[in-house]
Image: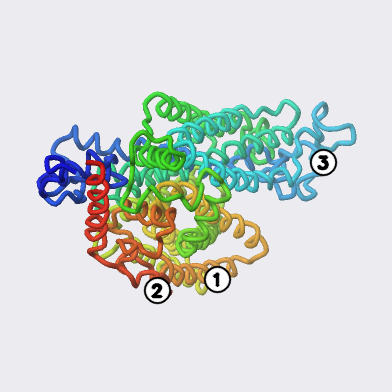
Amino acid sequence: MESGNKISPDSTKKEITLEKIGVKHHYDSQDIDSFEGNNNGHWNVTEVEPIKITNVQTWFRWVLSWMIPGFGMFLESFIIFSTGQLKTIWKSAYPTCWSASKNPNCPNLVKCNGLFNGNNAQTVVDGYCNSDGTYPSDTICDEGVLDSISYTEFAGIMLGMVVISLIADKLGRRIGSITTASIMLCGAVFMTFSIPFFGLNIMFIWFTTAFFVYGFGIGGEYPVSGSSAAERSQQSSPSSERGKDVALTFSLQGMGAVVGSLVVTLALVFTSQSAPDCSNSSNNEAGYDQKRLEIVWRVVYGFGSIMALMVLLYRFFFLKESEVWKDMKNKQNEGKKEQTGEAKTSSSTIFGAEKELKYDLNNTWELYYVSFRYYWPRLLATAGCWFLWDVCFDGNKLYSAEIFGKMVPDGNLISINLYILLNNVIAWLGYFGSAYVIDKGWCGRVRLQLLGFGMVFILFTISTVLFDSLPAVALLSLYVLSSFFGQFGPNVTTYVSAAELYPTPIRSTCHGISAFCGKSGALFATILFGFFSVNQIFLACAAVAGIGFIFTFIFLPNTANFNLIENDRYFEAILHNEEAEYQGECRNPKYCSNFEIWRGHCKNYDPDYYERKYIYKDEIALENVSLNF
C-alpha cells in the first residue's frame, strides 16, 4: 500500500469513520437528540433544549403541542364517561325499558299493567296497551341487552388495544391514529342515530353494536397516543420534561369528562328536564318528557361525532409520522437489506448491524415472544399496576351511586350531574398536579404512583369503617378525594410508564398489552362487585390499592430524566444476541426497579460503556478501510 494512501492522523479519523465507512450511531437521524462528532471521532448525545415560553404566541403553540395529540383521549372520556351519566337519563326517558321492575316515580302516570312491581294502571290507556291491558312489546327491553352495553364496551376497548397497537408498531403511528379516529367516528354516528323503529329493545341492540365499534377505536387510542406522545416529546423536549408532556396529553381524558358532564347538564337545563313532574299527564311513568330527554342524549353523542370528524380530518391531512418510529423502520429495513446483500450503503451500528438479527419483528408471534421474554418484569409493572388501578377505579365509580343517592334523595337529574361535574373538575386538577411533579427529582413516577395508591388505600379504608355513620357531605368529600388522588397518581403514571419503559419497535404493542390488562381489571371489578355489599366493595378496593402499592415498590422503574433512546440501544443488543455484553444506561440501578436490581439485571452497569464501544468499533472500521487503500 502506498504511503499517500495511508490513513492520516486523528484529524482525519472522524471523516473516514463517518463518511467512508458509515460507522455512526444507529439513531443519528432522529430529531430526538442530536449526535455531534467530537475531536476523537466519536459521538456525544446533546439533549434538546426546553421550550421557552416568552409570549402569548409561544404559550399557545406549547398548549396546542400537547392538546391536539390528546384529543383522542378527550373523545374517549367524553363518550364513555357521558354514557355512564346518560344511563341515569335513559332510566328516566324509558322507564318501561330500564326501570320496569321498580316502583315508578309517578304511579298515577302508569298507562298499562304488568310492570313496575305490580303498580298497575288506574285506567288502561286504550290504543296504547295490548288487548289484555299489558304494555306493548316494543316498549319493553331484555335485561341482558341492557347489561351487554357495559360488557360490549369492555370487549371493544380490549380488542382495540391489542389489534391497533400492532398496527401502530408495524405500519406507523400516523396510520394507527387515523384508524382509531375513523372507527370512533363510525361508532359515534351510529350511536347518535340509534332509532327505535322496531322498538326500544332493537334500538339498544343497535346502540350496543355501535358502542362496541366505538370502544374498538378508543382501545387503540391508548397505545397509539401514549407511544406518539412519548416520541413527540423526545423530538421537542429534553428528557427532564417528557413525563410532563405525556401527562398533559393524557390530561385531555380529564378534560373530556368535564366537558361531557357540562354538555349533559346544559342539555338538561335547556330541555327543562331537571326533576319528575307527575302532574303533567303527557309525561311518562318516571315523570319526564321522553322526547326531550331523547334530545339530551342524542345531542351529547352528536357533539362527540362532530369532534371525532374534526380529529379524523386533522390526522388525515396534517398529522405527520413519528420521526422516531420512521427512523427505526428505515434502519430495520436497511438491516434486512444488508443481510441479503441488497444494501447500497452500510448502516452499521455500535452493536454491529452486520450480524444476523436474532428475531424477526414482522412476525407477530416473535414480536410478542420478545416482549414477554425480555420485558416481563416491566410488563408486571405496567400491566399489573394498571390492572390493580382499574379495579380501584371501577370501585370508585360504584362509590358514586351510593354518594349521590344520599346527596340527592329526590333524584333531581341536574343536581346529580352538577355533583358529577364537580367531581370531574377536581379529578382533572389531579392530571395537572401529576404533570407538574412527575419529572421532579424528589418525586418521579414511582413515588407519585406510591402516593396515589397509598391515599386511595387510606380513603377506601375510612369508607369501609365509617360509611354508615358519616354524613353525606363527608362521604362526598371522600369520594372527590379518591378521584383526585386517582389522577394525581396511578391513572396518569400507568399511562406514562407504559409509554416509556419499552423500545420503539414494541412500544405500542407493550402499551396495548398493559392497557388491555388494565381494562381487564375494570371488567373483573364490574362482574365481581355485583355480588358484594357496599362495605365489601370498599374493603376490596382498599386491599387492591394496598397490593398496587406493593407492586409499584417492587416492579416499577423510575424513568424520570431517562433518555428513551437507551431502550432502543438495549433492544438492539437483544436483536443482535449481545444482551449479555450490554452495560449501558438500562443497567443503571438509578433506572431499574427493585425487582430488576434483586435479580441481578443491573449489576453490570458501566458508565464508560459507550466510550469503550465506540473506540472499539472505530478501530475495527479504520482497519477495514486501511485494507482497501
**Pointer 2: what residue?**
600
Q: Secondary structure at mark 3?
A: loop
**Pointer 3: what residue?**
113
Whether residue 70 appears in this view of the structure is no
Real-space Cα distance between discs 2 and 1?
Answer: 36 Å
Image-based side of 434 in relation to 535, left or right = left
Horizontal and vertical percent position of residue 141:
75, 40
Q: Are marks 1 and 3 in contact (CB under 8 Å)?
A: no
What residue is shown at x 20% (from left), y 50% (from top)? 43
* Image disc number at residue 539: 1
Name the quadrant of the N terminus. top left
Q: Nearer the viewer, residue 400 or 7?
A: 7
Q: Secondary structure at mark 2?
A: loop
Horizontal and vertical percent position of residue 447:
34, 66
Q: Amino acid at mark 2?
A: Gly
Horizontal and vertical percent position of residue 19:
22, 38
Q: Is residue 38 above or below residue 605?
A: above
Q: Amino acid at mark 3?
A: Asn
Q: Is residue 526 above or below residue 108?
A: below
Q: Nearer the viewer, residue 264 or 24?
A: 24
Whether residue 338 appears in this view of the structure is yes
